Image (cartoon, rainbow, N blue to C red):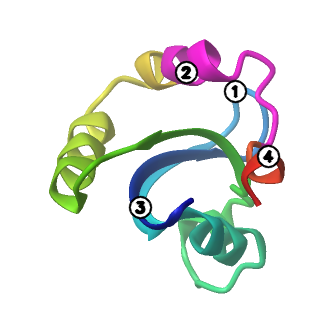
Amino acid sequence: MFDKQPVVYLLASKKNGTLYIGVTSNLIKRIWDHKNSVMDDFTKKYHVHLLVWYEIHETMESAVAKEKVMKNWKREWKIKRIEEMNPDWKDLYLSIS
């Protein structure tokens, strides 16, 4: 389902912890990469590995546009968005993989 499907996603280090927003066309693989610290990046450095929110898009263009908008959001707005979908901040990777 998530292979070749544009998705915007939010990762967290823990509930109300450090947040990371990204976009991908293969959510399962991308989150696996984050969890296994494949990339030497922000998520590896700050242990941001919990998939707490995602949104599927029809096109990569719309996903990238949404990611750019959300990167400018205030932290409170991102937390509200997470809690609307995932009030307990569960790791959603377990339900999609």
Answer whether residue 86 is magenta in the image: yes
Circle 2 is placed at which residue position? 79
Q: Nearer the viewer, mark 3 or mark 1?
A: 3
Distance between mark 4 and mark 3 Cα atoms: 16 Å
Please tell me which of labels 1 and 2 falls first in the chain.
Answer: 1
Circle 3 is placed at which residue position? 5
Q: Amino acid at mark 4?
A: Ser
- What secondary structure is marked by label 2? helix
Mark 4–mark 1 contact, CB under 8 Å?
no
Residue 47 appears at what percent x and percent y? 74, 60
Please tell me which of labels 4 and 1 falls first in the chain.
Answer: 1
Q: Nearer the viewer, mark 3 or mark 2?
A: 3
Mark 1–mark 2 contact, CB under 8 Å?
yes
14 displayed left or right of 31:
right
- What secondary structure is marked by label 4? helix
Q: Amino acid at mark 3?
A: Gln
Q: Nearer the viewer, mark 1 or mark 2?
A: 2
Please tell me which of labels 4 and 3 falls first in the chain.
Answer: 3
Residue 66 vertical position relative to residue 23 in the rendered view, above or below = above
| Mark 4 residue crowding within 10 angstroms, few (<14) / some (14–19) / many (20+) | few
Distance between mark 3 and mark 1 Cα atoms: 28 Å
Q: Nearer the viewer, mark 2 or mark 4?
A: 4
Q: Which mark is residue 95?
A: 4
Magenta extent: 79-91
Q: Which mark is residue 97?
A: none
